[in-house]
Amino acid sequence: MKRGENGVNHGTALSFVRMTQADNPHYEKAMGLYAQSFPYHEQREPSSQAAVLNKPAYHFDMLFDRDVFVGLMLSWQTEGFVYVEHFCIMPDLRGRGYGGLALAQLARLGKTVILEIDPPVDAVSIRRKRFYEAAGYQANPYSHVHPPYHAGCKGHPLVVMSQPRGLSAAEYEAFRLYLNDVVMRE
C-alpha cells in the first residue's frame, strides 16, 4: 500500500460492511475495538448495542481495507442528515489516512453529516478537532450535552461538528430531538 505525501493511502479499497446481528462472527472483534476506543460513559450498554443493530436507520459498519479490519463507523442515517454516533480506527492503523477516507466516503451520501467531539482542551482533543476540520467539518456554536448511556451517569458536554457546513438553529434542534427521542431510546 502506498502512502501519498499527505499520509493518505492510495490504492486502498476501503469498504463499509454493515452488521445487523450480534451473532456475526466479527461482532466480538468489533466490540473489542469499541470498548478500547471509547470511555465507559460514552458506550452503549451491550444489550442496547445488540438490540439496535437491526434498526433500519442504524448502520453498524465495520471498515475494511480489502480483508484487513481497520475500524468502525456507527451511524444513524435519516432523510435529512447522518449522525455519526461512534467512529474509530484500529490504534495501530491510525495516521494512515483511513479516517479521512471513511469520512470522504460518508460525505458521498450527499447529506449533512453530524458528529460530536470532546471540547478541545488538551493535546488529544485539539488534534481530533483539527482532524475533523481538515476533513471539512466545522464546529457549531450550540451548547450541547450528550445524554447519558448508563443509569447513574450524567450527560457530558460535547462540541457538535458538521459538514459540509454549519447547522442552522432549526437543524441543530432537529438533531438534538432525534438524539434524545430516537438514538438514546433504542
Image (cartoon, rainbow, N blue to C red):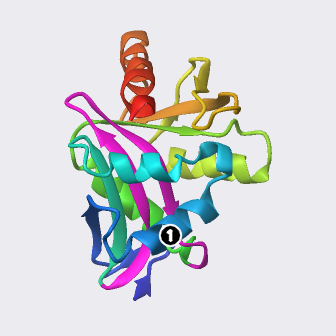
Give the residue at x 45% y 20%.
Answer: 176
Residue stretch rendered in magenta on the structure:
67-92
Instruction: Confirm whether residue 47 shows in the render.
Output: yes
In the displayed structure, would residue 166 be above or below residue 92?
Answer: above
Q: What residue type is labelled 1?
A: Asn
Is residue 51 left or right of 88 when viewed as pictured? left
Give the quarter of the image for residue 64: bottom left
Looking at the picture, how far across and down is residue 4, in whole percent? 45, 78
Residue 133 in the image, given as x and y percentages of width and height = 53, 44
Counting from the top left corner in percent of width and height, residue 59 is at 30, 51
* Magenta-span inclusion, residue 127: no
Q: At x 52% / y 47%, what residue is drawn?
A: 132
Crowding near pointer 1: few (<14 within 10 Å), some, many (20+)?
few
Residue furthest right as drawn: 122
Question: Can residue 135 be spotted in the picture?
Answer: no
| Picture layout, residue 14 above or below residue 51 | below
Q: Nearer the viewer, residue 179 or 96?
A: 179
The quadrant of the image that shows the C terminus is top left
**Element carrying mark 1:** loop
**Which is the main secondary structure of the residues drawn in magenta?**
strand
Q: Quadrant of the N terminus?
A: bottom left
User: Extreme top residue here?
Assistant: 170
Give me the residue at 53% from left, 30% from top.
160
Q: Quadrant of residue 50?
A: bottom left
Name the one closer to the observer, 40 or 104.
Answer: 40
- Which residue has dot 1 on it? 6
Going by the image, does 47 lie left or right of 122? left
All told, the count of numbered labels is 1
44 w.r.t. 183: above or below: below
For the residue pair 152 and 171, the one nearer the viewer reads as 152
Q: Residue 22 appears at what percent x and percent y?
A: 35, 63
**Is the residue 62 above or below the residue 109 in the image?**
below
